[in-house]
Amino acid sequence: MKYEAVIGIEMHAELNTKTKIFCGCKTDYGAQVNTQCCPICIGLPGTLPTLNKKVVEYAVKMGLACGCTINRETKHDRKNYFYPDLPKAYQISQYDIPLCENGEISFYVGEEKKSVRILRIHIEEDAGKLLHDNRFSGTLIDFNRCGVPLIEIVSQPDLRSPEEARAYLDALKAILECLGICNCRMQEGNIRCDVNVSIRPEGNEAFGNRVEMKNVNTFSGAVRGIEFEIARQTAVLEAGGAIEQETRRWDDDRGESLPMRSKEDAQDYRYFPEPDLVPIRLDRAYVEEIQSSLPELPLVKFERYWKEQGLTQYEATMLSTDKDKASFYESCIAVKPNLAKQICNWILGDIAKLQNQKHCLISDLSIDPSALCELIELNVAGTLSSTSAKAVFDEMVATGKAPGTIVQEKGLAQVNDEEALAAIVEKVLSENQGPIAEYHNGKTNVLGFLVGQCMRNSKGKGNPQLFNKLLAEHLNQ
Ligand SMILES: [Zn+2]
């Protein structure tokens, strides 16, 4: 029997507000343990929370970007549970009236456009962090993360494969980055997921019992976790067993999910309205203002780059999901719209390489978009070979000089003079009798080697297309 997976994802994203959700403590990552906390966020009795307005603004932004309805009257609720990283023994969250609900986001999985409904997006506070280390016995607690604002984005179970789940996660991350509301650094735990997976015989309408997998902290972990669960559940069913509704923990190092708790010991959170905070009431104008301030979203960008500007899907994805790359690309095509493809090649090629070497953003390299366009035009026009263009690029980044100036100073202009090139061709031919014989015996790819020899002789300045043409003429005489 063929089975189909049914997947839903709850994503927790830390908002990058300067201060915490209910107090004025900083949210900077990596600070000395227990230096960014106060009586409010460590839950001392008698303290009162005050809502950070920015948190609401950011969450509404995300809601609108995901096509959600914004509940203009909403409230906070207490979710009660005991765990050492939660000093109040309750988390301030939202229960029956989330700030945002009933949205939908679209993205591509290969050529296919896919939509996933968003059930809800609500705001809540993060818990502290438990520190386990071999250097000491027991467990220590860092409260710095207590009260860092989170949004929880809950999808409907609309995903059907690990690939779709990955594309959905990438799409959400791209939106968060585009809105600038989350730092999206997985290694700092800015994004954490719980993944619900069930399987059902293909063609069945009814859902199977679902397994909730917690502790999924990377997107690749989500994909592997889902693959693992599908395989595990399929094996259980095929052996005549039944899937129990349960919560499991994903262990990324072991590459498997492990039982955590069954349906019977599911927790009762005893939600009730938070008495220490007033309800949230938002003006229609406030929501409309946020709506009109939204930037162009990644999917719209992607489709524009792909369908209108002739980039491949891969290229369009690489640019549209990276704010820094997209912004530089946009400033370049504003100068030369007809060079979209070449600009993209540079961004994903030499510029990306340089970024990797320097571990920086394009914006840190201070490349002038007009200068890059000038360089590309010199290359396209045949004044500069591709090899020399790279050399000019390096010089341009290092000195800030204009490409034209560098070409003149270094004498890098490409030689397009056929007579000058013919002399080099003859020299190369006279020195390579062996390869010529191979060519005449049908090994025509020797031509590439000979072009390379000509380029070498011309110190990279000869026009390779012309060398190719001249060599072919000689050899076929
Ligand atoms: Zn605090």
Image (tube, rainbow, N blue to C red):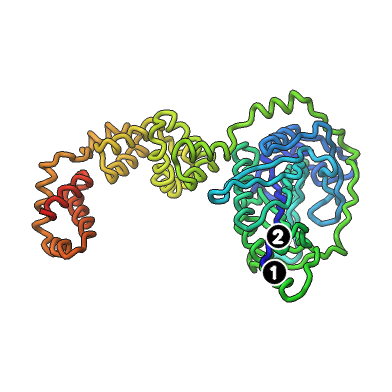
Task: From the viewer's perspective, tell me whether residue 111 is left or right of residue 275.
Answer: left
Task: From the viewer's perspective, tell me whether residue 319 is left or right of residue 64.
Answer: left
List the residue tagged with mark 1: 234
Asked whether mark 2 and ligand 1 are closer than 8 Å, the reply comes as no
Task: Point out residue 123 in the picture as x, y percentages from the top left corner.
Answer: 77, 41
The residue lying toward the viewer, choosing from 451 and 405, is 451
Residue type marked 2:
Gly
Residue type marked 1:
Thr
Neighbor class of circle 1 (other Cα within 10 Å; few <14, some 14-19, many 20+) is many
Compared with residue 80, is residue 67 higher up or lower down, i.e. above or below? above
The residue lying toward the viewer, choosing from 333 and 23, is 333
Give the image quarter of residue 296.
top right
The residue lying toward the viewer, choosing from 194 and 419, is 419
Compared with residue 155, is residue 278 higher up or lower down, i.e. above or below? above
Task: Point out residue 76 in the picture as x, y percentages from the top left corner.
Answer: 84, 40
Mark 2–mark 1 distance (CA, rounded to whole Å): 16 Å
Count of labels in the image:
2
List the residue tagged with mark 2: 203
Asked whether mark 1 and ligand 1 are closer than 8 Å, the reply comes as no
